[in-house]
Amino acid sequence: MAKQVVPEAARQRRRPTKNGTVLSERLIVETALRMLREHGSDGLTVRRLGAALGADPSTLYRYFRSVDELTLAIGDELVGRALHGWQPGGDWRADLRTLGARIHAAYLAHPQAAVLTASRVTGRAHEIAADEAILGVLRTAGFPDDAAVRVYHAFIDQSLAFAILDAATLALPESARRADEGVWRATYAQLPADTHPHIAATAGLLVARMNRSAYPTALEMLLDSAAAALADASPPAG
Amino acid sequence: MAKQVVPEAARQRRRPTKNGTVLSERLIVETALRMLREHGSDGLTVRRLGAALGADPSTLYRYFRSVDELTLAIGDELVGRALHGWQPGGDWRADLRTLGARIHAAYLAHPQAAVLTASRVTGRAHEIAADEAILGVLRTAGFPDDAAVRVYHAFIDQSLAFAILDAATLALPESARRADEGVWRATYAQLPADTHPHIAATAGLLVARMNRSAYPTALEMLLDSAAAALADASPPAG
DNA sequence: CTCGTCACGTCAATGGCGTTGGCATAAGCT
DNA sequence: AGCTTATGCCAACGCCATTGACGTGACGAG
């Protein structure tokens, strides 16, 4: 029989843990986010999370059926933070830029968490709100439904893909990051010109660009292409 | 003292394992790839990999210092398969399209492996060959070095980001995939129009597009933009 | 043909992990 | 005051990656 997990709203009879903290879904997610940031992707374990909260590890299963469910909650919290306080401004290009930048920033603020929840569909409140917001921007701007869905899809994919890619390099454990960086300097910068002429010729430029994000450029290309589609769909008024 | 890992070439005195198989770096990587495909991302463990090879788990540490190193080898194998037999054709746009498609395909053929190695720098042979190939295509086509590096960077990022994003949804454990799909049908398709008008209005279109990749479109946008940059840099001959 | 070396396979053990079922207890309702 | 039950704790299970000590068999040297 599946263990019962009572939804947050119905929770009532909280008992403090041994050391006095009072648990809640929110407190757990926030603590998990902090642990991810401070101790890396591998630093978050049920046992350590329990310890950080002063609670027995097994207690957390009263709030989340599994680490996977906790993961989804963390992801949705990230989306929630990204969208918090956002309002559409009326210019769809500016709106999409802002939304994209917010998502990107939220992910980069917690790269380890971002990587964990990459590509999952949470179906939780914040995620749904984000989808509704994006579709709303496009449809309000006059995109026909099918074009709106196309642009929505491309926008989501591009934002997520780049945010995750950027986050992934930030989220690597310190050791892996140093290893990867070492590989660049030790291997790429030293390749002889006779076997690898093109890398050798551009090694300096390559290393300099190493940690730049390609997202802003890609987003502008997407916006241009969407604008062209919109112009086609709705011929200039008057 | 660090355990000694002898490079493949220097290996000599192979002894068959208990059940007769003769190990090699290549055999291990290929078995790992098969296990990933068949049993999912969580299905690959040192213990199970050992069992599949008929070898004691600890034996694998004679070939790879850690699972992380094995992971990098798997990633490089994927790149190697993607580029195998490829030759530049002289038209840089076509070449980049082909390279992108090959990488994309190789990743999608082993989504679990692709996700594992996402965003790592292996510094191994195949990866270096790929970088050299891409830079070669661009510089041979007449891109000045800085433009070549810019396009290279955008191309790599976009290819990898989308390949990984696409692979990630394929790579989820069966349970998570069913859960995510269920969320779409159960949650998104059922949202009432008064609270979520935009999702409700486009639910059908959204669900239909669910598993389409945004990569091809994004790649064409990138190629167009690169072509424009090239035209600026080298005014038409004649 | 013999012998020594040592690469490589195996064994056993360590400490960590997620997860579960049983139990005690205190919060809130009647 | 008494009952129900949500919630925290405990102990245990079967996994995991990794390591150090131990053999043993293949090979090169003579």
Image (spheres, coloured by chain):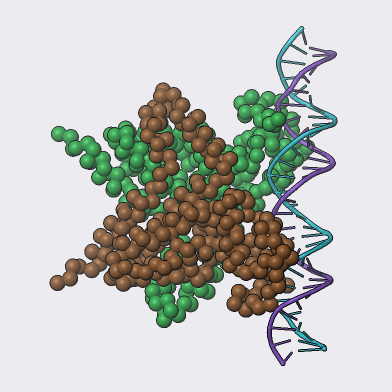
Chain colours: A brown, B green, C purple, D cyan
Horizontal and vertical percent for residue B77?
A: 54, 39
User: Does residue A156 appear to the left or right of B220 in the view shown?
Assistant: right
- Decide which of A54, A79 is in the foreground and name it: A54
- Decide which of A1, A16 is in the foreground and name it: A16
Residue positioned 49% across, 50% down in the render: A167
Horizontal and vertical percent for residue A51?
A: 69, 58
The N terminus of chain A - image quarter: bottom right
* Residue A80 seen in the current view: yes
Residue positioned 45% across, 80% down in the render: B192
Residue positioned 74% across, 65% down in the render: A18
Horizontal and vertical percent for residue A38?
A: 58, 51
Q: How many marks?
A: 0
The C terminus of chain A - image quarter: bottom left
Horizontal and vertical percent for residue A203?
A: 40, 31
- Decide which of B157, B95 is in the foreground and name it: B157
In the rendered image, the vertical position of residue A176 relative to residue B40, given as above or below: above
Quadrant of the rendered image containing residue D5: bottom right
Quadrant of the rendered image containing residue A98: bottom left
In the rendered image, the vertical position of residue B117 relative to residue A30, given as above or below: above
